[in-house]
Amino acid sequence: MFTPSTSKGLVRKIGAIKRFMASIKLPKISELPVLGHPLENAKRAAAYRAVDENLDVYKHRVIGIGSGSTVVYVAQRIGQYLKDDEYRDYVSKFTCVATGYQSKQLIIENGLSYGIIEQYPYVDIAFDGADEIDPNLNLIKGGGACLFQEKLVSTSTKLFIVVADTSKKSYTKLGSRWTQGVPVEVVPVAFARVQHDLLKLLNARTVTLRQGGKSKMGPVVTDNMNFILDACFGDIDDPGTLHQKIKSLVGVVETGLFVDNAYKCYLGDSDGEVHTIVKESV
Ligand SMILES: O=C(CO)[C@H](O)[C@H](O)COP(=O)(O)O
């Protein structure tokens, strides 16, 4: 039964929890425990540094959260700011827009407020991963099949920050490290036609309809109910022109070539070292 004494106890407990929460401080990067897998250390190092150096807690209000395994640490870090009493009042006013269901879940799991891009079409800053990054900050994205909403969010901000481990850096041309092909999101009914056009008109070496594998029989269906074709062109000389040509095919929704879009890239290695690539001008 609920009595005044149990209610007093409850109030005391809530007070204690609040005091405990208020005492949580943003963990210092230099004091973080080492993670079990070297690659996870690399991803966390890049993501935490990217957030610490670019997120303006006092000015930014609409934050884009991308997809993939590296961006998990971005959402985690922003969640840590939310718990710190120095930043809580500001971070609690953030609205985070997502690039798909995974990032929506990340936003919610980290206690951040989720908003839809239809209501927040201007994004102050966006963070996302990449599958390959060239020296000019052109990217291949879409390894996780989220490329359309990733492009929507990343082109809705001037501050698009990329987070990755160093294995994603290409020293020469896009397509030299990410060899499974450029992801192309297509309307399902048009997939065979686009596949044919990519091979015959744009000279793709191979074009594969991405399959769900063990977790789903048949083609991968994106968050927008489309299919993904992986089109392999070898080393890509001119990503901008290739993107335009693919985009002009009937049935193509978006390509995974992100050209002249990223502002800065953070590449982490397993020792926790982080290297950056910065775009010359914004
Ligand atoms: O483009 C993406 C999903 O469509 C991801 O950002 C990209 O695949 C990188 O993922 P990860 O951080 O797991 O390496």
Image (cartoon, rainbow, N blue to C red):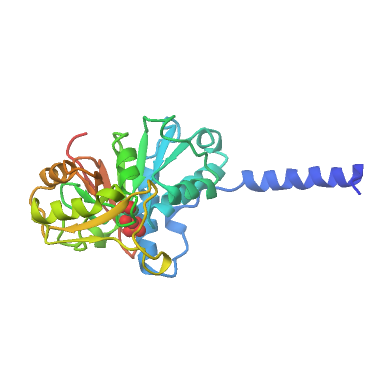
Q: Position of residue 51 (x, y in %)?
A: 39, 45
| Depicted 14 relative to depicted 156: above or below | below
Residue 133 visible within the image: no
Q: Choose top left, top right, bottom left or bottom right for residue 280.
A: top left
| Depicted 129 relative to depicted 272: above or below | above
Q: Choose top left, top right, bottom left or bottom right for residue 121.
A: top left
Q: Residue at x 68, y 43 (%)?
A: 18
Q: Position of residue 111 (x, y in %)?
A: 55, 45
Which image quadrant: the C terminus? top left
For this view, does 176 lie left or right of residue 166? left
Number of numbered callouts drawn: 0
| Depicted 182 relative to depicted 258: above or below | below
Foreground of the two, 139 or 13:
139
Q: Position of residue 263 (x, y in %)?
A: 25, 40
Q: Position of residue 67 (x, y in %)?
A: 38, 51
Q: Residue at x 46, y 58 (%)?
A: 31
For this view, does 165 lie left or right of residue 194? right
Residue 206 visible within the image: yes
Q: Residue at x 36, y 37 (%)?
A: 125
Foreground of the two, 232 or 86:
232
Foreground of the two, 208 or 17:
208
| Depicted 225 relative to depicted 37: above or below | above
| Quadrant of the displayed image that contains ligand 1 | bottom left
Q: Choose top left, top right, bottom left or bottom right for residue 271.
A: bottom left
